[in-house]
Image: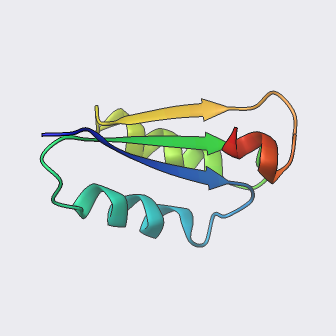
Amino acid sequence: MNLVSIVITCFNAQETIERAVLSALSQDWFEKEIIIVDDFSTDKSYEILSKIVDNNKEITLIRHKSNLGYPAALN
């Protein structure tokens, strides 16, 4: 079976990011990885993501050192 990659970008999305990640986790693909790129959020998004990642080995969390914008987060 093929690996499915789910990529989520985040910038100041504290109100919705947990729901997006939980939705990705609930997908029933046999083999999946979830990659989240936080584009240096200034709200509580990164803290929320860190807590979720601590409990899920399927997730890789990347945080930019400064806000680089949506295209850079996708790349």
Q: Residue at x 74, y 55 (%)?
A: 11
Q: Residue furthest front?
A: 2
Check the image and report above or below for 73 versus 26.
above
In this view, the residue in front, 31 or 19, is 31
Residue 63 seen: yes
Residue positioned 40% across, 38% down in the render: 53
Front-most of residues 6 and 64:
6
Q: What's the residue at 18%, 54% (across, down)?
A: 29
Q: How is the image coloured?
A: rainbow
Res 57 quadrant in image = top left
**Residue 40, placed above or below residue 45:** above
Front position in the image: 8 or 48? 8
Q: Position of residue 50 (x, y in %)?
A: 50, 39
Residue 19 located left or right of residue 66? left
Question: x and y percent of residue 3 in the render?
Answer: 26, 38
Residue 72: image x %, image y %? 79, 40
At horizontal 79% and vertical 48% (from top left) the residue drawn is 71
- Is 23 positioned to the left or the right of 73 in the image? left
Q: Quadrant of the N terminus?
A: top left
Give residue 16's quadrant in the image.
bottom right
Percent of width and height locating residue 48: 53, 51
Q: Is there any visible trace of residue 39 in the rendered image?
A: no
Q: Compared to 71, does 66 lie above or below? A: above
Q: Give the total number of marks visible in the rendering.
A: 0
Most distant residue in the top direction: 65
Question: Which quarter of the figure is the C terminus placed in?
Answer: top right
- On screen, residue 23 versus residue 19, left or right, reads left
